[in-house]
Amino acid sequence: MLFIPLPFVVAILLVVLFVAVRTRDAGTAPNLPFQALILLSALQSTLSGLRWGYAVQPIMYVMPVAAAMVPPLAYLGVSRLARKSALSSLQQICLHALPAGLIIVLIAIWRDAIDIAIVLVDIGYAAAILLLMRSGTDALRLAPFENAVPTYRAILFAAGALILSAAVDIFIWLDFAWAAGQYALKVITFGNLVGLAILAIAAAAASRSHAPNDKVETVQPPEILQDTQTLDAVQALMKDRHAYRDVDLNLDRLARKLAIPARQISVAINRATGKNVSQYVNEYRIAEACTLLVQTEKPVTEIMFDVGFQTKSNFNREFRRVTDTTPLEWRERSRRPSG
């Protein structure tokens, strides 16, 4: 019977995941850092199999460099959805290539410091990602509102995977220092592979949110509007122009339509309603869905698309959050004779 070591199985599955993501995102503006992260995770898994399954010694010089490239790719993918960097693409690449460059230098002059350097890179980037996400789903300015919640959760899982990777590296370092590497192989085989899988899956989930292919404009409003004025402007856009039906609507796009800074919209909605922007917009979508369920015979799936949702899972989740019931139950209950 053909036996394939676990790291190679994981690598194959990650390549399949990459192909699926590329196919899914065809025709959109893909999140290239997240896609590169999936491929790099597959490469890392392959290197792990060669190093620990077949004792290919030269791999030990490649693995730490690859490991140092993972956290920057995760951060760049998140940053692309949050649009936080004022740097050009080339400047960002140069900046986030520094961890890999540092590891290459350490390989040449101070190999004992490599493990602790990788741990610090993992923890540092995990903290940076969590800092970007401190305002919740509203931080994802370029993520369509429909996918904001699952994207936010996927990003938190990615940060958790980086912390898990750091914990595994610390354990391995202590194991070699105190127990001559007695448990290292088991931990590397399962711990690192689990971390890679979580990170890649999280990247695939988060990459579902993408910036639409429209031109980005910088708007300088003539004056700062008060919260009530901002909310009135948003409500008018939703009620009069039904902007919520735009499946690619996100905070950045909403800000351009209103010529109001994204942060001002986010703060105004949060203070006035206690909700984030994605919840606020999705409630307009659900309100129209409720009306269509009662007044038309359209199938639930058609109504879902009409009001701006693209996936049934997100539609059902938001519908239950707003109405505490399912679309079919709402239709049946609303048409049931009273009394």
Image (cartoon, grey):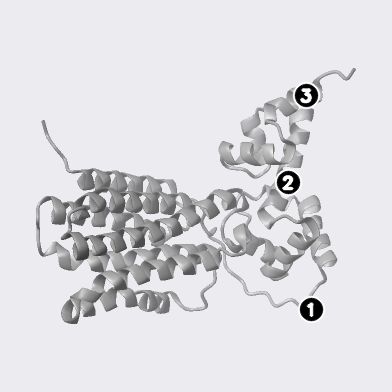
From what the image shows, is residue 324 above or below residue 119? above
What kind of residue is marked 2?
Answer: Glu
- Discs 2, 3 touching: Cβ within 8 Å: no
Q: CA distance from mark 2 to mark 3?
A: 20 Å
Residue pictured at 12% horizontal, 34% vertical: 2
Q: CA distance from mark 3 to mark 1?
A: 47 Å
Q: Earlier in the sequence, mark 1 or mark 2?
A: 1
Residue 256 in picture, x, y percent from top left: 67, 66
Residue pictured at 53% horizontal, 60% vertical: 213
For label 1, count other residues whose C-alpha is less than 10 Å away and answer few (under 14), some (14-19) or many (20+): few
Q: Earlier in the sequence, mark 3 or mark 1?
A: 1
From what the image shows, is residue 189 above or below residue 56? above
Residue under pointer 2: 283
What kind of residue is marked 3?
Answer: Arg
Location of residue 74 (image quadrant): bottom left
Residue under pointer 1: 223
Tell me if residue 30 can be seen.
Answer: no
Q: Is residue 137 left or right of residue 191?
A: right
Location of residue 317 (image quadrant): top right
Query: In the structure shown, which secondary structural element does the residue marked by tag 1 occupy?
Result: loop
Q: Is residue 317 left or right of residue 221?
A: left
Q: Earlier in the sequence, mark 2 or mark 3?
A: 2
Q: CA distance from mark 1 to mark 2?
A: 29 Å
Check residue 333 in the rendering and tell me which mark sits there, or answer none: 3
